[in-house]
Amino acid sequence: MEVIQVFDRPASQTFYSVAGRLLFTECFIPELRDLIVDLFSGWQLTPVSLPGRSPDIQISFSCGEAQQSIPRDLEQFEIAEGGKCHTGGTELYLELGGAVVHLANQNSVYVSFTELPR
């Protein structure tokens, strides 16, 4: 089985199979990429070769860049671990520690960190 992982370019792109669904991840920072690969392997996600179909969900990871701005007109409430959830209509943002998770639509998630997670 050939696993599609691109480590010699600015971005790492990997496909995983999860309960019959296809997950695509991309990351532009090698140190963060290594943390994500370790995390996903601990969850026992199965890397797969180029699947020949569109992924069911795509997660893009970034770090140290300008953090995603959260629209001010969204409803806000606190969640566990001192986090905050911002929601309204189809928008969903989670603030947890130094990370912002943005569910952009049913298929795309953007995760940005202010610094590398420990």
Image (cartoon, rainbow, N blue to C red):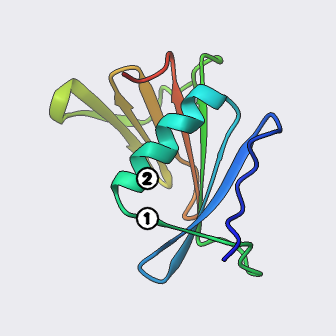
Quarter holding the N terminus is bottom right
Q: Quadrant of residue 97?
A: top left
From the top left corner, tell me how far across and down residue 89 is, in percent: 47, 53
Q: Which residue is mark 1?
A: 45
From the top left corner, tell me how far across and down residue 118 is, in percent: 36, 21
User: Under tag 1, what secondary structure?
Assistant: loop
Task: Say which amino acid is labelled 2.
Answer: Phe
Count the numbered circles shown. 2
Identify whether 116 is placed above or below 13. above
Question: In the image, 76: left or right of 17?
Answer: left
Question: In the image, 75: left or right of 101?
Answer: left
User: Under tag 2, what secondary structure?
Assistant: helix
Badge 2 local density, few (<14 within 10 Å), some, or many (20+)? Answer: few
Question: In the image, 43: left or right of 66?
Answer: left
Question: In the image, 55: left or right of 103?
Answer: right
Badge 1 local density, few (<14 within 10 Å), some, or many (20+)? Answer: some
Question: In the image, what residue occupies the spot 48% across and 20% down?
Answer: 116
Foreground: 61 or 85?
61
Name, please, the residue furthest toward the left: 80
Name, please, the residue furthest toward the front: 1
Question: In the image, what residue occupies the spot 48% across and 25% down?
Answer: 72
Question: In the image, what residue occupies the spot 77% across and 81% down?
Answer: 52
From the top left corner, tell me how far across and down residue 2 is, in percent: 71, 71
The image's mark for residue 40 is 2
Whether residues under marks 1 and 2 lie with C-beta atoms below 8 angstroms apart, the answer is yes
Task: Say which amino acid is labelled 1.
Answer: Leu
Foreground: 89 or 110?
110
Q: If you read the primary sequence from the N terminus, does the residue marked by circle 1 or circle 2 appear first?
A: 2
Q: CA distance from mark 1 to mark 2?
A: 6 Å
Foreground: 27 or 44?
44
Name, please, the residue furthest toward the right: 9
From the top left corner, tell me how far across and down residue 17 is, in percent: 52, 73
